[in-house]
Amino acid sequence: MWTEWCGLRKFPEALLSVVTIAIKVAELSTVTRKKLFTAAGLLLACFVSSIAFAQTARWSEERANAWYAKQPWLVGSNYIPKSAINELEMWQAATFDPTEIDKELGWAEAMGMNTMRVFLHDLLWQQDADGFRRRLDQFLTISSRHHIRPLLVLFDSCWDPMPQLGPQHPPVPGVHNSGWVQSPGAKALADPAEVPRLKAYVQGVVGAFAKDDRILGWDVWNEPGSDQTENYPRTELNNKDKIARVAALLPQVFAWAREVNPTQPLTSGVYEIDLSRDEKSQDELETIQLRESDVITFHNYSWPESFQQEVAWLRRFHRPVICTEYMARSVGSTFDGILPVAKQEHVGAINWGFVAGKTQTYYPWESWQHPYILRDPPVWFHEVLRPDGTPYRKAEVELIRKLISR
């Protein structure tokens, strides 16, 4: 009986039963009273436990789809101001630039964008938690003024594994994303003693904004376990070891965030799904991401047919689907090819790169092997706008505006 009554749906009838019995308590013996109060105590404990589980569990399919039904068609970019080479330079007090952010998000608003994917970093919380919280609140005020609700990224396995606070180095000439940094860095990821600090960061940031309608959602880990040994052979963790450490930590990150009861959904975007296998046969990290995410997000830098096939594969989870990285012109992922498909499928679409700046992601990935020193690439890889806010390709901006307005 107690097992049945521990469900939230049966709690009212259980409570009514206890109250009904309690009316006759005065007629009962002392021993019977003790049994009754013990039963009532167990029932209350079950109820509290059920509430805690309901608040920390993954969203149901129904809740996730109800949330998505209230959203506009989500379109935006992965955003960092042109003045910052990485997430540390964006957010540290000495280089945080609200004026530039306000101007650039104004450009985004003008073309109809309604979201941005924005990266945070654990070292910012360690350095100055109160200051970081204030700057994030200021950013949210600016983005809200431009009718943009960001998807905030907590951790990231890409690029430089040795992040350092303070002034960041200048961009390497001609090289794509030469200053982006991982969070947590390799040393922190390899050290179990760092786990409490990482938990404090997750719960501190998510907890501070858990009920904030200005935030679209939380992307808890970008491309978890991504192998960076080719570009950082001396400082990156062995990939097998890195994957094992991330696989142990990723479910905890979801749990930590859920413990502070955010009203926004949690996700982590899959980026290496094998469409030839079912969901039970994916690699460990993809399995965790798909199992834990409230809404399904993914990255796709390939042709439109590949994009559409991946969307179809992800529909099996019966949850909203959002693409949180796409658009790399020279490898076949373009606004012209992808955005109409995303619109037709009602899939959110967040491209990589908004304004050309210090990240230099208008250079292709292969610029790490062949830097573009003497000339620009034949076609920009990422980015929508030039540094002055004019479109790299006017037809792309017109297409974005047209599809959003429909």
Image (cartoon, rainbow, N blue to C red):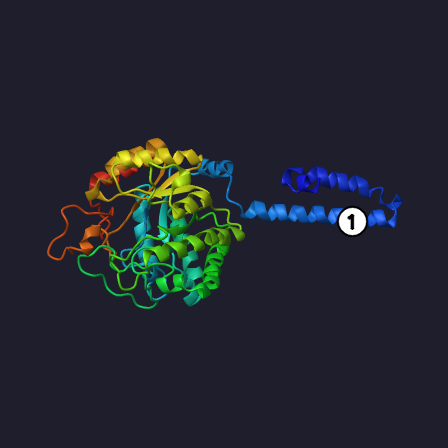
Q: Residue 293 placed where, x, y %?
A: 44, 44
Q: Is residue 98 above or below residue 109?
A: below
**Image quarter hosting the C terminus:** top left
Q: Looking at this view, name the residue that lies furthest to the left.
A: 374
- Going by the numbered disc 1, the residue's amino acid type is Phe
Tell me what residue is drawn at x 35 percent, y 35 percent: 311
In which quadrant of the rendered view does residue 122 lie? bottom left
Q: Nearer the viewer, residue 262 or 248?
A: 248
Q: Residue 265 placed where, x, y %?
A: 46, 45
Tell me what residue is drawn at x 16 percent, y 45 percent: 379
Q: Nearer the viewer, residue 59 or 375?
A: 59
Is residue 10 left or right of 97 when viewed as pictured? right
Q: Residue 93 placed where, x, y %?
A: 37, 65
Is residue 378 left or right of 297 when viewed as pictured? left
**Residue 147 makes an appearance in the image:** no
Residue indicated by mark 1 = 37
Quick one: label 1, few (<14), some, or many (20+) residues within 10 Å? some
Q: Nearer the viewer, residue 210 or 293?
A: 293
Q: Nearer the viewer, residue 246 or 111?
A: 246
Tell me what residue is drawn at x 23 percent, y 64 percent: 170
Q: Residue 378 placed where, x, y %?
A: 13, 46
Element type at mark 1: helix
In which quadrant of the rendered view does residue 349 lie? top left
- Please state the total of marks drawn on the protein image: 1
**Image quarter hosting the N terminus:** top right
**Residue 160 makes an appearance in the image:** yes
